[in-house]
Structures are given as structure tokens and as C-alpha cells.
Amino acid sequence: MRKYLIGMLLVFVLPPAAAQEMTYQSTMLGVMGQAAIYDTYITSSNYAGTNFGLFHEQMRMTGLNERSIAMQHLFNLNVAVDDIQSMAMLEYGWGLHHRFEPLNGFQFFFGGQAHGMIGGIYNLSSNGGNNPATIKLHFDLGLSGIAAYQLEVKKQPVKLRYQATIPAVGLFWAPGFGQSLFEISLSKYPITFASFHNYLSMRNVLSVEVPFKYATVRLSYVNWMYETRINDNETRIHTNTLFFGLSKYFTVQPGRSVKQFME
């Protein structure tokens, strides 16, 4: 009865044939990183300090387009903490990527991603007319590409992977210079159309995975560049972080014929 209920749930939740596909999952901690932050809404001074975070990814082939479409979920937390300034950004991305036929051992994916971000920056040293904190709220649609390659080092398989994501259009929170939350509450909420003219962002993820007997170790370098210019406010956030964690493949129906998203 339990197996029957699980099977019925998968029929309604997953795309056609997806229950037979193997899911890739990875969780990593940002163990070493640097962040550079500049935001004129709270202060015009530059901040440079330590950055750490959490990175979680799930990806699997779906039953769409003759099983050539991969679905990806990305969760990312960036945290920078200092005696003067602190930052926390929580992001979620959902994407669909078309898997191309392998070329000379390389595997390529290309598609789109829906992305949301919520967070803020708090500055203890702000004075004068500037606010001590600023809210960051985004929703956007963009492009995403993945290149993967597997090689052997002393008969040990090693997977290399690079992914880049670039937002194209969306909406984001954009108050006027020095406008307080009280002033915002008395007027229309400052939600602004976002595109390349006022919002530039890019995330680069370069990963190395080495499988061992009981676990696959993943090491990733994540570079995030984020800039906005709107309503006399300018924000620049650049982070470079080294992540370390584990990854694995699994399926909810063991024994079935499965297909990994990255062979």
C-alpha cells in the first residue's frame, strides 16, 4: 500500500517519466571567501571583509522533449559579517536546461532560470541623512549555461563543471536616495522594472567532484557580481567564495533503468 501511494504521488508531482530519472543533489558550505560591498543608500564607504554561505543544488533529467530537458533547483545563502557592516542574501533559482549531445567528451546544457532574492545590508557606522539598513528584493528571468567534462587522474574519475547564470529582465525593490521605510509606506512601493540598463548580475560556479567509496566530494569556487543603479542609488556586491561539500545521485525507485543528467 505504501509503495502504491508513493507511486501515485510521483505521477502527479513529477513530469512524465521523471520518476525513472536519477536526481543529482549537492550541499556545500562556504568555508573561505571575500566580499566587497558598496551601497549609497546606507553609506558611500566601501566594505571589504569575510564572506561565507550555503549552497544547495538539485538537478535531474525530466520526461520533457524526449528526456532531453534537465530541471535544476538552486538555493544559495551569502553572509558577510563585520563589526561595521553585515550582509545576508538568500536566493532561489529554478531552471530548465536543454541537454545537447556530447561533443568530444564535453556535455553542454543551455536554458533559462527564474530567480528570486531577498536580503539586506546593515551598516552600524551610518550617520547623517543615510539609513542604517537597506532591503534587497528581486525577481528575474535569465539565461543559464553548463559545461561539464569527466577525466581520469591515476584511474580516479574526476568531474569538472562550470555554470554561468545571467539575469535578463525582472523586478526589484528600488527606493529613492535617503528615503526611509516610513516615507516608503506613505507612497507607492518602489518596485522597478529591471534589465541590463539598471541591473547587472552574474554568477560563475566552477566545480570539481571526486567520487570515493561512500561519498563524492565537491569543491566549488563561486564568483558573484551584482550591481544596480537606480533612483540616485548605486549598489555593488562582489563575492568570491570557496565551497566544500558532498554530492550524490539517488532515485526514489531503486532498480529502475535510470539516466543521469551528467554522465
Image (spheres, rainbow, N blue to C red):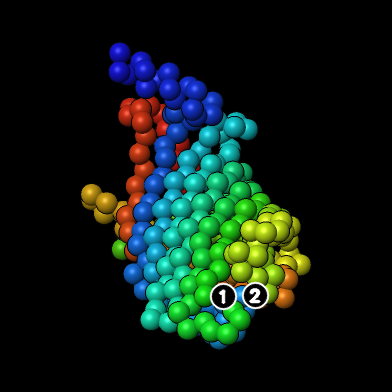
Label 1 sits on a secondary structure element that is: loop
* Vertical comparison of 261 with 63: above or below: below
Residue denoted by label 2: 178
Q: Crowding at label 2, few (<14), some or many (≥20) Cα neighbours within 10 Å?
A: some
According to the picture, the residue beneath numbered tag 1 turns out to be: 131
| Residue in the foreground of this view, choosing between 181 and 263 | 181
* Residue 122 horizontal side relative to residue 114, left or right: left
Q: Residue at x 56, y 64 (%)?
A: 135
Q: Position of residue 42 (x, y in %)?
A: 57, 77
Identify the amino acid type marked 2: Gly
Q: Please give the name of the residue rendered at 59% of the width and 43% of the height, measured from the top-left corner.
A: 96
**In the rendered image, is residue 242 in sight?**
no
- Whether residue 97 sits left or right of residue 124 in the image: it is right
Q: Is the C-beta separation of discs 2 and 1 under 8 Å?
A: yes
Residue displayed at 45% across by 79% down: 124
The picture places residue 99, in percent across and down from the top left corner, at 58, 44
Query: Is 120 drawn above or below residue 64 in the view shown?
Result: below
Image-quadrant location for residue 130 = bottom right
Crowding at mark 1 (Cα within 10 Å: few <14, some 14-19, many 20+): many
Q: Which mark is residue 218?
A: none
Helix, strand or loop under label 2:
loop
Mark nearer the N terminus (2 vs 1) = 1
